[in-house]
Amino acid sequence: MRGVVCPAAVALVCVVGCCVVGCGVTSGYSLERAYTSDVRTVAVPVWDNATFSTGLEVQLTEAIVKEIQRTTPWRVTSGASADTSLTGSITDVSLRELSSTRGTGLTEEQLVSMTVEFEWRDSRSGQLLTSREDFTAGGTFVPAPSSRERIEVGEYGAIDQLARDVVRSLRSAW
């Protein structure tokens, strides 16, 4: 039976063909590690704060350290012995009204917007790995008389979001 083609053989040829063609793909999904493997340790000194909102730099630094420990394979160590260093500065903290009461005009919901800039450098070579400016995140809070949330609720939301976003930006370029 010479002219009969086995369906399983056709399927196998298609699968192998797709795998061979897919080997050169450089965008889309990847099975590579999300974080570079030549970095084992990161130093995260307390960030600077160029605003009048004191104490936020310490909270942000702690949140970034915890996020690195939670989501990456790297260890956080002191600056002298670390492979890389992540430094940054809070450049702006502002409040924006999101909603107000119709009759009185009192603020019901506000957004704490926090902007940072940061650099991630290889301490061994001095090479700049990643740098961002005007990197912004926000957190909301409700100061209305019914709930009386404090501004710290919004600040915590902004800090938490910034920590996640900063650490995500340290991923390898896929």
Image (cartoon, rainbow, N blue to C red):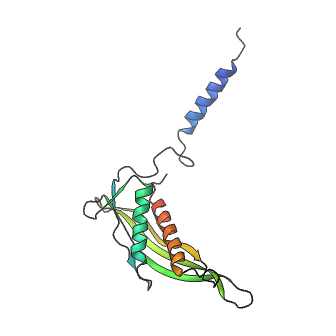
Query: Eyeballing the image, is 147 above or below 1?
Result: below
Q: Nearer the viewer, residue 137 or 84?
A: 137
Residue at left offset 71%, top offset 86%: 101
Q: Nearer the viewer, residue 139 or 37?
A: 139
Q: Nearer the viewer, residue 66 or 122?
A: 66
Q: Position of 43 compared to 131: left or right? A: left
- Which residue is the extreme one toward the bottom? 104
Residue at left offset 47%, top offset 54%: 173
Quarter of the image for residue 48 reads bottom left
| Residue 150 rendering spot, x and y as whole percentages | 54, 81
Residue at left offset 29%, top offset 59%: 82
- Which residue is the extreme one toward the left? 80
Q: Nearer the viewer, residue 8 or 52?
A: 52
Query: Eyeballing the image, is 135 above or below 70?
Result: below
Q: Position of 98 compared to 31: left or right? A: right
- Which residue is the extreme one toward the top? 1
| Residue 162 rendering spot, x and y as whole percentages | 49, 68
